[in-house]
Amino acid sequence: MAAPTTTRTTRRLRVHGLATAALASAVLLAAAGPVAGAAPRALPPGTQFTPLTAAVMTEPTPFPATDGRAHLSYELLTTNALSSNARVQLDQVDVQDARTHQVIGSLSGRALAEAANPVGDPLPGADAYTPPPPPPMPTVLLGSQQWVIWLDFTLPDGQPAPEAVEHHFTGTILTPGGSSPFEETVWTTPLGRAAPPELAAPVGPGAWYASEACCGNTHHRRGFAPINGSFHVPQRFAIDWYRVGEQGQTWAGDPARLDSYLSYRQPVLAAARGKVVEVQDGIPDNTPPHTPPIPPIADTVGNHVTLEVGPGRYLLYGHLAPGTLRVREGDCVEPGQELGLIGNSGNSTTPHLHFQVMTTPEFFPTDSPPFTFREFSVLGQVEPRLWDDNLGIQPTGVLPITPSPYEGPHRAEYPLDREVLGF
């Protein structure tokens, strides 16, 4: 996990009207002046106490997607720093160019409510087939409570990405004695400047369904995990791949049989030149179509292969079939080389390939940066959320594929969630 970086903790704060007891106490302590005999020291301009704090959990990096736009997807870990009797109503979050202060992304109202949740209280719907109930509005952080805000937006067309972004909060402090509107600008962070790695296909030629990709409310994008005392989003840009037949089917026959799934025992391929740094085998395949018990943390991705393809960049191929891995640790592989066959091992309900880029050789803990594929075609899209846990319990295995506005050939782009691609 890349450590959060910042060039400035806070830039400015405006609190109108009633000050909370916590803020008032802090202001009185600050106004008491320096200790006798100490030389006075000027603070940086705009230094203020802030009711909310924020930190990013990754290095935000722009990436091109199949909609032809440059996307930015990352998280803000936000804390109400006030006492338990002071709630903060967060009305708007603006992501701004740190140099020009131009707003490049904004959340408010229902959109903000759907993109924010308390730590440990995930957004509903990330692991369910039915649409989630509407979240409570407005967005209110209890005193001393910590939330995660999931930021996903596109950058303005024709404008280069800023070198750094800052985050402007607008809201109201709520106390038993009254309310006080506030504004604050916090956590300036540089954007990643290196282009996302450009990869070859991780699977063989044909049609493939890209499930649980960025950037909606999926278990990959919003998979928030406390590991070894730190928070991580280890699957932010992971994609689950399912083979699609000529009739749009992902399975045919009895969905309780592994060999009914077109993905089962399909080869997975090295998407870049690299070195094998981790291999795990011997975990049995689960029986579909119902979700198995959660395995031990070390077996989460089942039988898998990890390739090192550059400094701090690793490719993970998860849920492979036992006994089918073709490589060993230390092997050097070339693009297109077969690594193993798709299975249903680990935390997997129906056969598929879990594929992603990581910043460490291990799946836990790691960070999940964006990537692109060198060449592919968009064949269509799937509107309902069909994924690992509900794919095998549908009336049939045929995907409801509809036309996509982005159909056709694509180069050096990231496929968005629920697109059907041709490699």
Image (cartoon, rainbow, N blue to C red):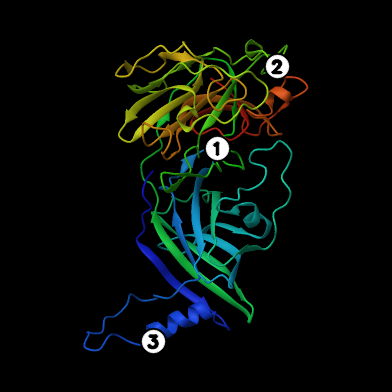
Residue extending farthest to the right is 395
Q: Secondary structure at mark 1?
A: loop
Which sits in the foreground, 47 or 403?
47
Task: Specify the label residue 285 is tagged with.
Answer: none
Mark 3 secondary-structure assignment? helix
Residue 296 point in image, percent of width and height: 50, 30
Q: Is residue 41 left or right of residue 194?
A: left
- Graded by Cα atoms within 10 Å as few (under 14), some (14 to 19) or many (20 or more), the crowding at tag 1 reads many
Type of the residue with mark 1: His
User: Horizontally, is 383 left or right of 363 in the view?
Assistant: right
Residue 255 disc label = 2
Query: Label 1, label 3: how many angstroms apart (C-alpha)?
Result: 47 Å
Q: Quadrant of residue 212?
A: top right
Q: Amino acid at mark 3?
A: Ala
First in sequence: mark 1 vs mark 2:
1
Q: Residue at x 61, y 33 (%)?
A: 406
Q: Secondary structure at mark 2?
A: loop
Upstream in the sequence, badge 1 or badge 3? Answer: 3
Q: CA distance from mark 2 to mark 3?
A: 70 Å
Marks 1 and 2, Cα distance to the nearest angstrom? Answer: 24 Å
In this rendering, the answer to whether 61 lies above or below 334 is: below
Say which amino acid is labelled 2.
Pro
Please state if 322 lies on the left or on the right of 403 as rendered.
left
**Residue at horizontal 51 percent and vertical 33 percent from the top:** 238
Q: Which mark is residue 220?
A: 1
Residue at the disc numbered 3? 31
Q: Residues within 10 Å of mark 3 (few under 14, many from 20)?
A: few
Residue 154 in the image: above or below residue 411: below
On the image, the x and y values in percent for residue 60 come to: 43, 48
